[in-house]
Amino acid sequence: PLEILFLDGETTVPIDGSYYPSPEPLSGEGQLLYTTSGTEGFKTALSEPGAYLFKADQLPKFEGFEPIPEQTITVVRGELTVHKIQLVRSQ
């Protein structure tokens, strides 16, 4: 399983509940099994461990913050991977 959190400093920024990622496996043929989103980011299950690419245009947008750059996240079999993305305020 993978959990992605979006942070403004130490504060978790809620996401729109309709956001669903579509990561691309960088090796192997892993697939997205399911996603649940809530006020503190989202959790997803992938069919295989390994590295996955979350493209910038597939990540949520947050008003008042810069766009999030693409993210490469490595998921380990049998472990909860928690990936924290620090948001940058717009100038």
Image (cartoon, rainbow, N blue to C red):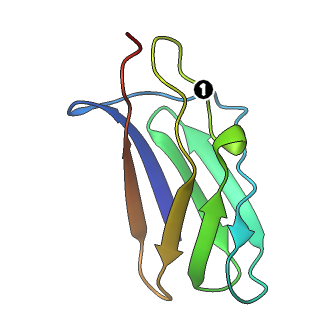
Total numbered badges shown on the rendered structure: 1
Depicted 16 relative to depicted 68: above or below: above
Q: Position of residue 45 (x, y in %)?
A: 63, 69
> Which quarter of the figure is the C terminus placed in?
top left
The answer to which image quadrant residue 19 occupies is top right
Instruction: Identify the residue at the far left of this view.
Output: 10
Residue type indicated by callout 1: Lys
Q: Give the image location of residue 30, x and y in percent.
A: 74, 81
Q: Is residue 84 above or below residue 65?
A: below
- Determine the residue located farthest toward the front in the rendered image: 91
Residue placed under numbered mark 1 in the picture: 61
* Residue 47 lies in quadrant: bottom right
**Quarter holding residue 60:** top right
Q: In the picture provided, is 48 more to the left or to the right than 71?
A: right
Report helix, strand or loop for mark 1: loop
- In the image, residue 50 above or below residue 32: below
Q: Is residue 38 left or right of residue 28?
A: left
Viewer-proximal residue among 53 and 11: 53
Q: Give how far across and how far down residue 82 sits, in percent.
A: 38, 62
Vertical arrangement, residue 70 with respect to residue 7, above or below: below
Mark 1 closeness class: few <14, some 14–19, many ≥20 residues within 10 Å: some
Q: Is residue 58 left or right of residue 72?
A: right
Residue located at (36% from left, 18% from top) = 89
Give percent across and percent down for residue 3.
47, 58
Please name the residue shown 50% across and 88% down the image.
77
Task: Determine the residue positioned at 65% across, 31% down.
Answer: 17
